Image (spheres, rainbow, N blue to C red):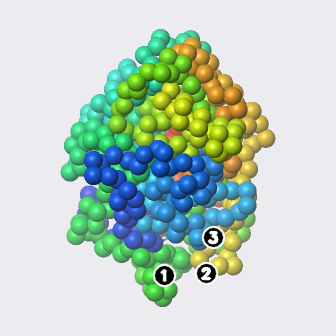
Amino acid sequence: MILIGAGPSAVASARALVDSGRDFLWLEAGSETTLPLRDRLDATGAGPALTDLMVGSHPAFGSAEESPKLRAPALASLMAGYDADPVGDGESFRSVGLYGTGGLSNAWGTMVRSYSADDLGAGDGEWPDYEASYRSMADMIGISGPAGQDGDDPILRTLPGLMAPLPVDAPAGHVLGQRAPKTGAQLYRPYQAVLTAAHAGRPGCDRRLACLWGCDRGSAWSARFEVARLKQSPHADFRPHHRVVGIAKTPSGYTVRAEVDSGSIVSFETERVILAAGTIQSTALALDCAGHEGDVPLLTTPSFAAAYYVLPAFGRTARRSGYSMAQISWNEPGDAGGSGALYTTDGLPLSELAIHFPLSRRGSWRLGTLLAPAILVSNGFLPSEWSRNRAALSRNQRAPRLRIAGAHAADADARARQAQTALSRTLRSRHTYELPMSFKVGRPGTDIHYGGTLPRACARTAGLPLTTDGLGQLPGLSGLHVVDGSVLPRLTAHHPTLSMMANAHRIPRQLA
Ligand SMILES: Cc1cc2nc3c(=O)[nH]c(=O)nc-3n(C[C@H](O)[C@H](O)[C@H](O)COP(=O)(O)OP(=O)(O)OC[C@H]3O[C@@H](n4cnc5c(N)ncnc54)[C@H](O)[C@@H]3O)c2cc1C
């Protein structure tokens, strides 16, 4: 058995394989990830001063305007390897990837949610398997968030090991402390892959305000922490620096070809492959193996952002929570609604705030410094029904790639504005006002939630020419199991990674 990748999806599968005692060869394109900016944390552990991160003054902000996801300088250098050689390309689509243990979870915002059986295309009687995998993954990661009636996720709010959420900064506290209005968006404390107490050998958050720079302690989860543990198992033969460049069907199984750092190619024969290299990379490899000529849908969750001013927080001494991940999650009611998160600006690079102002760089920075303590920044996502990207194999390279034509539905911008307005209405009732002209819709791909290229066959995907069965297998490719976001039939407006992991854990459990 060969497992490909070392991001969240792959460690979910690795966990199931180790637990069931299956031996596997584990191939990962990159190296062991280390965070590049650790040396920038000063002796007290505080993150860099905001003034040190003026717009444009930091080399890592080269493309800060690209994504409404809140980013920190650490991310740019982590992603440089993929950016130099993207597997998915196309002028109208921003494809984001990260080679190395942990994959994109080294940069993620740690927001976790579950999907429903319908969203996952679960067949009759299958939901208990999905639910068991959700619970296993939540237990592996360690999740904090609201319990019982205070929470809005049916699985996560009942987790036995759910940890108390972190405290919030003053502006978020003001917004959460008010009575809920009858219309508009609903506000909750988020579910996060951030420890507030010691768990699985990792310590709870020490609130050093360094989250968006990468959490070396392990309080904010990355799949690289699981790789470090799982590769110790006698069942796992972990090989970093092995980038898979081809999978070919043979009479007895598959030949997997990988490029090692020297540029030479090594081949492995196996009866079964678990493909968890991230949606774009896995899709390129699977389409190549299947010899599929046509294009396929690539689902994303069109993203948008805006900034808010919390009037009662102006001029007050800010209460600092000491962490800079999302402080509030928001949802429009209903399955088709938008969803997202609100961040305070403490610990965020000022550039993340200033890019929302319609002023010059200098003017934006000055205004940002003045307003920062009373600002909330929101991001939001629409369900994948509003994405229209298409991806096709491009074979004119050494390794298979995808040529991606990125697009949103014609009414996606209007729908995003409507969702933002629902949030603004709720926040207005809490004396919190959207900053004029701060609303932005991200271009296709900048949400960095990719899926649905090889979706599970279900009512929702009926009529699509290329679907997978409940074990992630394409027709004619029995034993090649695609387990990551590629096989999700739909992306909801909520963050998808925990659902990718639950599925990637479920499939090898079924095989065992
Ligand atoms: C800034 C940012 C914020 C985000 N915030 C959130 C959030 O709050 N919540 C959420 O749910 N999601 C979030 N995401 C998305 C989340 O990171 C991804 O959904 C998740 O990492 C996907 O996991 P994966 O294992 O499928 O793929 P990846 O994380 O992309 O991992 C792929 C792995 O496969 C390896 N690989 C790739 N190609 C090959 C190959 N050819 N051969 C061998 N190995 C290969 C890579 O090196 C890597 O180890 C965020 C992403 C970013 C960048």
> Who's the residue at 47% across and 80% down the image?
258
Q: Is mark 1 within 8 Å of ligand 1?
A: no
The kind of secondary structure element at disc 2 is loop
Residue type at the position of mark 3: Arg
Q: Quadrant of the N terminus?
A: bottom left
Residue 36: name its quadrant: bottom left
Q: Position of residue 437 (x, y in %)?
A: 70, 32
Q: Position of residue 178 (x, y in %)?
A: 46, 13
In this image, 146 relative to 196: left or right? right
Is residue 322 positioned above or below 91 on the image? above
Q: Quadrant of the C terminus?
A: bottom left
Q: Position of residue 407 (x, y in %)?
A: 73, 50
Label placed on residue 54 = none
> Who's the residue at 50% across and 49% down the image?
53
Is residue 201 positioned above or below 269 on the image? above
Q: Mark 2 and mark 3: span between their CA atoms? A: 9 Å
Is residue 73 positioned above or below 328 on the image? below
Q: Position of residue 346 (x, y in %)?
A: 44, 37
The kind of secondary structure element at disc 3 is strand
Residue type at the position of mark 2: Arg
Residue of label 3: 401
Residue of label 1: 259
Q: Mark 1 and mark 2: span between their CA atoms? A: 10 Å
Tag 1 near tag 2, CB within 8 Å: yes
